[in-house]
Amino acid sequence: MHKKLKLKSAVMFMLFMSTCGRVDASNMNTSIESQHTAPKATEVEAKGRFWDLPYLEKAFITPKPEENEDGITVGKLDLNNTGKAGIIDFATAIAENKYGQYDSLLISHKGKLVFESYYHRGRVDLPHDQASAAKAYTSLLLGRAMQLGYLSMADLHKPLVHFLKGLDTEQLVKGAENITLHKVLTMRSGLKIHQEKADELSKRHSQLSSTVVNRVHGQGFVQELLVHSKPITPASQSFVYGNYNPTLVMQVIAAVVPGNVDKFIENELLDKLGITDYRWMTAISGLPEAGWRVSLKSRDMMKLAELVRNDGNWQGEQLIPVVYLDKATQKLTKPVSDWIPKHYSYGYFWYQTDVDINDKSYSTHIAWGGGGQRLIIVKELDLTIVTTGHDADDRIFEHIAKSVIPAFVL
Protein backbone atom coordinates (compact mmCIF):
# COMPACT_ATOMS: atom_id res chain seq x y z
CA MET A 1 0.00 0.00 0.00
CA HIS A 2 2.70 2.47 0.97
CA LYS A 3 4.84 1.65 -2.03
CA LYS A 4 1.84 2.53 -4.17
CA LEU A 5 1.47 5.81 -2.27
CA LYS A 6 5.13 6.69 -2.90
CA LEU A 7 4.79 5.88 -6.58
CA LYS A 8 1.61 7.90 -6.84
CA SER A 9 3.30 10.83 -5.07
CA ALA A 10 6.22 10.76 -7.49
CA VAL A 11 3.92 10.55 -10.51
CA MET A 12 1.79 13.44 -9.23
CA PHE A 13 4.94 15.47 -8.67
CA MET A 14 6.14 14.96 -12.24
CA LEU A 15 2.71 15.80 -13.61
CA PHE A 16 2.67 18.97 -11.54
CA MET A 17 6.10 20.03 -12.68
CA SER A 18 5.23 19.36 -16.31
CA THR A 19 2.22 21.67 -16.14
CA CYS A 20 3.72 24.38 -13.93
CA GLY A 21 5.80 27.06 -15.60
CA ARG A 22 7.68 28.17 -12.47
CA VAL A 23 10.16 25.30 -12.20
CA ASP A 24 11.28 22.80 -14.83
CA ALA A 25 11.27 19.16 -13.67
CA SER A 26 14.79 18.57 -14.97
CA ASN A 27 16.33 21.17 -12.68
CA MET A 28 13.80 21.00 -9.81
CA ASN A 29 16.31 20.14 -7.06
CA THR A 30 18.81 22.80 -8.17
CA SER A 31 16.12 25.47 -8.29
CA ILE A 32 14.71 24.72 -4.85
CA GLU A 33 18.08 24.23 -3.15
CA SER A 34 19.22 27.60 -4.46
CA GLN A 35 16.74 29.29 -2.09
CA HIS A 36 19.10 29.85 0.82
CA THR A 37 17.36 32.61 2.75
CA ALA A 38 14.25 31.78 4.71
CA PRO A 39 11.64 34.57 4.94
CA LYS A 40 12.05 36.99 7.83
CA ALA A 41 9.57 39.40 9.38
CA THR A 42 9.81 43.07 8.56
CA GLU A 43 10.09 45.54 11.43
CA VAL A 44 6.39 46.33 11.10
CA GLU A 45 5.41 42.65 10.98
CA ALA A 46 7.49 41.86 14.05
CA LYS A 47 5.60 44.46 16.08
CA GLY A 48 2.13 43.61 14.81
CA ARG A 49 -0.40 40.90 15.50
CA PHE A 50 -0.06 37.45 13.99
CA TRP A 51 -3.49 37.71 12.40
CA ASP A 52 -2.44 40.88 10.61
CA LEU A 53 0.59 39.26 8.97
CA PRO A 54 0.35 39.29 5.17
CA TYR A 55 0.76 35.98 3.39
CA LEU A 56 4.14 35.35 1.79
CA GLU A 57 4.14 36.11 -1.93
CA LYS A 58 6.05 32.88 -2.52
CA ALA A 59 6.56 29.84 -0.33
CA PHE A 60 10.08 29.00 0.84
CA ILE A 61 10.97 25.31 0.43
CA THR A 62 14.44 23.85 0.82
CA PRO A 63 15.79 20.31 1.33
CA LYS A 64 19.09 21.84 2.46
CA PRO A 65 18.45 24.27 5.37
CA GLU A 66 20.89 27.03 6.18
CA GLU A 67 22.87 27.11 9.39
CA ASN A 68 22.05 30.28 11.33
CA GLU A 69 23.91 29.97 14.68
CA ASP A 70 20.82 29.00 16.66
CA GLY A 71 22.27 25.74 17.95
CA ILE A 72 20.56 23.54 15.37
CA THR A 73 22.69 21.17 13.33
CA VAL A 74 21.68 21.22 9.67
CA GLY A 75 22.07 18.70 6.87
CA LYS A 76 20.31 17.87 3.63
CA LEU A 77 17.39 15.65 2.70
CA ASP A 78 19.33 12.52 1.84
CA LEU A 79 16.62 10.23 0.45
CA ASN A 80 16.10 8.37 -2.79
CA ASN A 81 14.63 10.39 -5.65
CA THR A 82 11.09 9.15 -5.07
CA GLY A 83 11.13 9.96 -1.34
CA LYS A 84 12.68 13.39 -1.82
CA ALA A 85 10.35 14.28 -4.69
CA GLY A 86 7.36 13.12 -2.67
CA ILE A 87 8.21 15.40 0.27
CA ILE A 88 8.83 18.41 -1.99
CA ASP A 89 5.56 17.63 -3.74
CA PHE A 90 3.82 17.51 -0.35
CA ALA A 91 5.34 20.87 0.64
CA THR A 92 4.24 22.38 -2.67
CA ALA A 93 0.70 21.13 -2.05
CA ILE A 94 0.73 22.82 1.37
CA ALA A 95 1.77 26.08 -0.27
CA GLU A 96 -1.23 25.74 -2.59
CA ASN A 97 -3.66 25.27 0.34
CA LYS A 98 -4.49 21.70 -0.59
CA TYR A 99 -4.37 20.66 3.06
CA GLY A 100 -5.41 23.91 4.71
CA GLN A 101 -3.66 27.02 6.00
CA TYR A 102 -0.24 26.06 7.33
CA ASP A 103 2.74 28.29 8.01
CA SER A 104 5.75 25.97 8.29
CA LEU A 105 6.94 22.39 7.90
CA LEU A 106 10.34 21.37 9.24
CA ILE A 107 11.91 17.90 9.28
CA SER A 108 14.89 16.67 11.28
CA HIS A 109 16.46 13.26 10.66
CA LYS A 110 19.17 11.66 12.77
CA GLY A 111 19.65 14.89 14.69
CA LYS A 112 19.99 17.18 11.69
CA LEU A 113 17.49 19.66 10.25
CA VAL A 114 17.16 18.39 6.67
CA PHE A 115 14.05 20.14 5.39
CA GLU A 116 12.64 23.60 6.06
CA SER A 117 9.68 25.39 4.54
CA TYR A 118 7.53 28.43 5.26
CA TYR A 119 4.18 29.45 3.82
CA HIS A 120 1.47 32.03 4.36
CA ARG A 121 2.19 33.69 7.75
CA GLY A 122 5.34 31.70 8.46
CA ARG A 123 8.57 33.56 9.18
CA VAL A 124 11.80 31.94 10.31
CA ASP A 125 12.47 34.63 12.93
CA LEU A 126 8.93 35.18 14.23
CA PRO A 127 7.49 33.26 17.22
CA HIS A 128 4.27 31.47 16.28
CA ASP A 129 1.30 30.93 18.58
CA GLN A 130 1.45 27.41 20.03
CA ALA A 131 -2.12 27.01 21.31
CA SER A 132 -2.42 23.74 23.26
CA ALA A 133 1.03 22.51 22.28
CA ALA A 134 1.98 24.60 25.31
CA LYS A 135 0.49 21.85 27.49
CA ALA A 136 3.21 19.47 26.32
CA TYR A 137 5.84 22.10 27.16
CA THR A 138 4.40 22.36 30.68
CA SER A 139 4.84 18.60 30.97
CA LEU A 140 8.49 19.02 29.99
CA LEU A 141 8.87 21.71 32.66
CA LEU A 142 7.59 19.28 35.26
CA GLY A 143 10.16 16.79 34.04
CA ARG A 144 12.86 19.45 34.34
CA ALA A 145 11.87 20.05 37.97
CA MET A 146 12.14 16.31 38.49
CA GLN A 147 15.62 16.16 36.95
CA LEU A 148 16.77 18.86 39.37
CA GLY A 149 15.43 16.91 42.36
CA TYR A 150 12.43 19.06 43.25
CA LEU A 151 10.01 16.21 42.48
CA SER A 152 10.19 12.44 42.10
CA MET A 153 8.26 9.84 40.12
CA ALA A 154 6.58 8.82 43.37
CA ASP A 155 5.29 12.38 43.74
CA LEU A 156 3.13 11.89 40.65
CA HIS A 157 0.70 9.89 42.78
CA LYS A 158 0.61 12.19 45.79
CA PRO A 159 -2.33 14.58 46.34
CA LEU A 160 -1.80 18.06 44.89
CA VAL A 161 -2.67 19.54 48.27
CA HIS A 162 0.55 17.93 49.56
CA PHE A 163 2.56 20.42 47.49
CA LEU A 164 0.33 23.50 47.77
CA LYS A 165 1.04 24.53 51.36
CA GLY A 166 -0.76 27.85 51.02
CA LEU A 167 -4.22 26.29 50.68
CA ASP A 168 -6.79 26.43 53.45
CA THR A 169 -7.63 22.72 53.37
CA GLU A 170 -10.54 23.11 55.80
CA GLN A 171 -12.56 24.83 53.07
CA LEU A 172 -11.84 22.47 50.20
CA VAL A 173 -14.50 20.40 48.52
CA LYS A 174 -14.90 16.76 49.50
CA GLY A 175 -12.49 14.51 47.61
CA ALA A 176 -9.98 17.25 46.81
CA GLU A 177 -7.25 14.97 48.16
CA ASN A 178 -7.97 12.55 45.29
CA ILE A 179 -6.47 14.96 42.77
CA THR A 180 -2.90 13.82 42.00
CA LEU A 181 -0.36 14.97 39.45
CA HIS A 182 -0.93 11.74 37.54
CA LYS A 183 -4.65 12.44 37.32
CA VAL A 184 -4.11 16.06 36.32
CA LEU A 185 -1.50 15.26 33.66
CA THR A 186 -3.95 12.84 32.06
CA MET A 187 -6.81 15.39 32.13
CA ARG A 188 -8.63 13.61 34.94
CA SER A 189 -8.61 16.03 37.86
CA GLY A 190 -12.36 15.63 38.30
CA LEU A 191 -13.04 19.35 38.75
CA LYS A 192 -16.58 20.43 37.97
CA ILE A 193 -16.95 24.22 38.11
CA HIS A 194 -20.23 25.88 37.27
CA GLN A 195 -19.90 28.07 34.19
CA GLU A 196 -21.02 31.21 36.05
CA LYS A 197 -18.26 30.69 38.59
CA ALA A 198 -15.72 30.06 35.84
CA ASP A 199 -16.75 33.31 34.14
CA GLU A 200 -16.42 35.16 37.43
CA LEU A 201 -12.92 33.80 38.07
CA SER A 202 -11.79 34.84 34.60
CA LYS A 203 -12.63 38.46 35.47
CA ARG A 204 -10.80 38.48 38.79
CA HIS A 205 -7.22 38.37 37.56
CA SER A 206 -5.95 41.34 39.54
CA GLN A 207 -7.69 40.32 42.76
CA LEU A 208 -6.47 36.74 42.67
CA SER A 209 -2.95 37.89 41.87
CA SER A 210 -2.84 40.27 44.82
CA THR A 211 -4.03 37.99 47.63
CA VAL A 212 -1.45 36.95 50.23
CA VAL A 213 -1.80 33.24 49.48
CA ASN A 214 -1.35 33.91 45.76
CA ARG A 215 1.56 36.28 46.14
CA VAL A 216 3.54 33.78 48.22
CA HIS A 217 2.66 30.51 46.55
CA GLY A 218 0.59 31.29 43.45
CA GLN A 219 -2.32 29.36 44.93
CA GLY A 220 -5.19 31.81 45.30
CA PHE A 221 -6.75 30.61 42.06
CA VAL A 222 -6.45 26.94 43.06
CA GLN A 223 -8.12 27.72 46.37
CA GLU A 224 -11.11 29.09 44.47
CA LEU A 225 -11.27 26.03 42.21
CA LEU A 226 -11.10 23.53 45.05
CA VAL A 227 -13.70 25.38 47.10
CA HIS A 228 -16.27 25.86 44.35
CA SER A 229 -15.95 22.56 42.47
CA LYS A 230 -18.49 19.81 42.93
CA PRO A 231 -17.13 16.89 45.01
CA ILE A 232 -14.24 14.98 43.44
CA THR A 233 -15.30 11.36 42.93
CA PRO A 234 -14.08 8.38 40.89
CA ALA A 235 -16.90 9.08 38.46
CA SER A 236 -15.92 12.73 38.03
CA GLN A 237 -12.26 11.83 37.45
CA SER A 238 -12.76 10.89 33.81
CA PHE A 239 -11.03 12.49 30.83
CA VAL A 240 -12.11 16.11 30.33
CA TYR A 241 -9.83 18.11 28.06
CA GLY A 242 -8.52 21.36 29.55
CA ASN A 243 -10.62 21.83 32.68
CA TYR A 244 -7.85 23.74 34.51
CA ASN A 245 -5.57 20.68 34.49
CA PRO A 246 -2.53 22.45 32.97
CA THR A 247 -3.00 25.32 35.45
CA LEU A 248 -2.82 22.87 38.35
CA VAL A 249 0.46 21.43 37.05
CA MET A 250 1.99 24.89 36.77
CA GLN A 251 0.88 25.60 40.34
CA VAL A 252 2.80 22.56 41.57
CA ILE A 253 5.91 23.54 39.59
CA ALA A 254 5.76 27.04 41.09
CA ALA A 255 5.36 25.58 44.58
CA VAL A 256 8.36 23.25 44.45
CA VAL A 257 11.02 25.11 42.48
CA PRO A 258 13.05 27.83 44.20
CA GLY A 259 12.50 31.45 43.29
CA ASN A 260 10.35 32.80 40.48
CA VAL A 261 8.74 30.21 38.21
CA ASP A 262 9.10 32.53 35.19
CA LYS A 263 12.84 32.49 35.75
CA PHE A 264 12.74 28.72 36.14
CA ILE A 265 11.14 28.40 32.71
CA GLU A 266 13.69 30.77 31.24
CA ASN A 267 16.84 29.56 32.94
CA GLU A 268 16.24 25.85 33.34
CA LEU A 269 14.61 24.93 30.03
CA LEU A 270 14.50 27.59 27.34
CA ASP A 271 17.98 29.03 27.88
CA LYS A 272 19.40 25.51 28.00
CA LEU A 273 18.11 25.01 24.45
CA GLY A 274 19.18 28.43 23.23
CA ILE A 275 15.58 29.65 23.01
CA THR A 276 15.64 33.39 23.67
CA ASP A 277 12.98 34.87 21.39
CA TYR A 278 9.60 33.73 22.70
CA ARG A 279 6.42 34.87 24.41
CA TRP A 280 5.02 33.19 27.52
CA MET A 281 1.99 35.03 28.84
CA THR A 282 0.64 35.26 32.40
CA ALA A 283 -2.46 33.34 33.48
CA ILE A 284 -5.38 34.40 35.65
CA SER A 285 -3.57 32.91 38.63
CA GLY A 286 -0.68 35.33 38.20
CA LEU A 287 1.62 32.47 37.21
CA PRO A 288 2.79 31.66 33.68
CA GLU A 289 0.22 30.13 31.36
CA ALA A 290 0.33 26.34 31.16
CA GLY A 291 -2.03 25.38 28.37
CA TRP A 292 -1.85 28.13 25.73
CA ARG A 293 -0.73 31.73 25.07
CA VAL A 294 2.86 30.70 24.39
CA SER A 295 4.68 31.60 21.16
CA LEU A 296 7.83 29.97 19.77
CA LYS A 297 9.73 30.00 16.50
CA SER A 298 9.48 26.89 14.34
CA ARG A 299 13.18 26.09 14.75
CA ASP A 300 12.85 26.39 18.52
CA MET A 301 9.91 23.99 18.43
CA MET A 302 12.26 21.60 16.67
CA LYS A 303 14.69 21.86 19.59
CA LEU A 304 11.97 20.72 21.98
CA ALA A 305 11.05 17.88 19.64
CA GLU A 306 14.70 16.81 19.43
CA LEU A 307 14.95 16.95 23.23
CA VAL A 308 12.14 14.40 23.46
CA ARG A 309 13.55 12.24 20.65
CA ASN A 310 16.90 12.18 22.44
CA ASP A 311 15.37 10.97 25.72
CA GLY A 312 15.65 14.33 27.47
CA ASN A 313 19.31 14.88 26.65
CA TRP A 314 20.48 18.08 24.97
CA GLN A 315 24.06 18.36 23.78
CA GLY A 316 25.32 16.02 26.46
CA GLU A 317 23.29 17.39 29.37
CA GLN A 318 20.36 15.42 30.77
CA LEU A 319 17.59 17.99 31.16
CA ILE A 320 14.64 15.65 31.73
CA PRO A 321 14.68 12.16 33.26
CA VAL A 322 14.38 9.30 30.78
CA VAL A 323 11.93 7.54 33.10
CA TYR A 324 9.63 10.58 33.17
CA LEU A 325 9.63 11.08 29.40
CA ASP A 326 8.95 7.40 28.87
CA LYS A 327 5.93 7.66 31.14
CA ALA A 328 4.75 10.98 29.71
CA THR A 329 4.62 9.65 26.16
CA GLN A 330 2.95 6.32 26.92
CA LYS A 331 -0.66 5.31 26.27
CA LEU A 332 -1.97 6.18 29.72
CA THR A 333 -5.59 6.98 28.94
CA LYS A 334 -7.98 7.24 26.04
CA PRO A 335 -9.10 10.78 25.17
CA VAL A 336 -12.84 10.96 24.55
CA SER A 337 -13.29 14.42 23.04
CA ASP A 338 -15.05 14.07 19.69
CA TRP A 339 -12.46 16.21 17.87
CA ILE A 340 -9.56 13.95 18.89
CA PRO A 341 -8.93 11.09 16.41
CA LYS A 342 -10.05 7.77 17.86
CA HIS A 343 -6.67 6.16 17.21
CA TYR A 344 -4.94 8.66 19.53
CA SER A 345 -3.98 7.82 23.10
CA TYR A 346 -2.95 10.28 25.80
CA GLY A 347 -0.02 10.45 28.19
CA TYR A 348 1.10 13.42 30.27
CA PHE A 349 -0.18 16.20 27.97
CA TRP A 350 1.33 14.27 25.03
CA TYR A 351 -0.57 12.30 22.40
CA GLN A 352 0.50 8.91 21.07
CA THR A 353 -0.57 7.03 17.97
CA ASP A 354 0.81 4.27 15.78
CA VAL A 355 1.62 4.85 12.12
CA ASP A 356 1.43 1.68 10.03
CA ILE A 357 3.93 1.43 7.16
CA ASN A 358 4.58 -1.74 5.19
CA ASP A 359 2.91 -3.99 7.77
CA LYS A 360 4.89 -2.47 10.63
CA SER A 361 3.74 0.00 13.29
CA TYR A 362 5.83 2.98 14.37
CA SER A 363 4.99 4.58 17.70
CA THR A 364 4.57 8.32 17.23
CA HIS A 365 4.46 10.98 19.94
CA ILE A 366 2.74 14.30 19.30
CA ALA A 367 2.45 17.69 20.98
CA TRP A 368 -0.64 19.21 19.41
CA GLY A 369 -1.94 22.77 19.39
CA GLY A 370 -5.08 23.81 17.54
CA GLY A 371 -4.60 25.39 14.14
CA GLY A 372 -1.69 23.17 13.17
CA GLN A 373 1.02 23.42 15.84
CA ARG A 374 2.69 20.04 16.13
CA LEU A 375 5.84 18.39 17.37
CA ILE A 376 5.91 14.88 15.90
CA ILE A 377 8.50 12.39 17.11
CA VAL A 378 9.11 8.93 15.61
CA LYS A 379 12.02 7.69 17.71
CA GLU A 380 12.49 4.41 15.86
CA LEU A 381 13.19 6.37 12.67
CA ASP A 382 15.27 9.12 14.38
CA LEU A 383 12.68 11.47 12.90
CA THR A 384 11.11 14.69 14.17
CA ILE A 385 8.65 16.89 12.31
CA VAL A 386 7.35 20.35 13.21
CA THR A 387 4.37 22.17 11.75
CA THR A 388 2.70 25.50 12.44
CA GLY A 389 -0.52 26.80 11.02
CA HIS A 390 -3.82 28.57 11.44
CA ASP A 391 -6.18 26.02 9.96
CA ALA A 392 -9.64 25.50 11.42
CA ASP A 393 -9.95 21.79 10.58
CA ASP A 394 -6.29 21.00 11.30
CA ARG A 395 -5.89 17.47 9.95
CA ILE A 396 -2.35 17.80 8.59
CA PHE A 397 -1.01 14.86 10.61
CA GLU A 398 -3.00 12.32 8.62
CA HIS A 399 -1.33 13.60 5.44
CA ILE A 400 2.11 13.62 7.08
CA ALA A 401 1.59 10.01 8.11
CA LYS A 402 0.95 9.08 4.48
CA SER A 403 3.30 11.41 2.61
CA VAL A 404 6.28 12.19 4.85
CA ILE A 405 6.96 9.51 7.47
CA PRO A 406 7.02 6.60 4.95
CA ALA A 407 9.83 8.31 3.03
CA PHE A 408 12.18 7.64 5.97
CA VAL A 409 11.42 3.91 6.21
CA LEU A 410 14.29 2.00 4.57
Image (spheres, rainbow, N blue to C red):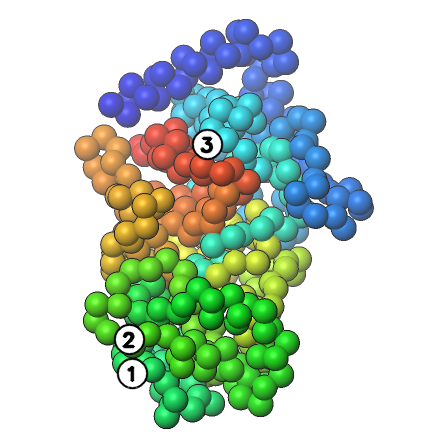
Quadrant where the C terminus is found in the figure: top left
**Badge 2 element:** loop
Classed neighbour count for the residue bearing mark 3: other residues with Cα under 10 Å, few (<14), some (14–19), many (≥20): some
Q: Are marks 3 and 1 in contact (CB under 8 Å)?
A: no
Distance in Å between CA atoms under marks 3 and 1? 59 Å
State which quadrant residue 281 falls in. bottom right
Q: Residue at x 36, y 35 (%)?
A: 398
Disc 2 marks a residue whose amino acid type is: Ile
Quadrant where the N terminus is found in the figure: top left
Q: Which mark is residue 174?
A: 1
- Residue 185 on image: x %, y %: 35, 66
- Residue 154 on image: x %, y %: 28, 79
Q: Residue at x 57, y 58 (%)?
A: 294
- Residue 261 on image: x %, y %: 56, 76
Classed neighbour count for the residue bearing mark 1: other residues with Cα under 10 Å, few (<14), some (14–19), many (≥20): some
- Residue 296 on image: x %, y %: 59, 53
**Badge 3 element:** loop
Q: Residue at x 60, y 35 (%)?
A: 118
Classed neighbour count for the residue bearing mark 2: other residues with Cα under 10 Å, few (<14), some (14–19), many (≥20): many
Where is 46 relative to 393, above or below?
Answer: below
Distance in Å between CA atoms under marks 1 and 2? 6 Å
State which quadrant residue 320 falls in. bottom left
Q: Which residue is mark 3?
A: 78
Where is 338 relative to 136, above or below?
Answer: above
**Badge 1 element:** loop
Q: Are marks 1 and 2 in contact (CB under 8 Å)?
A: yes
Disc 3 marks a residue whose amino acid type is: Asp
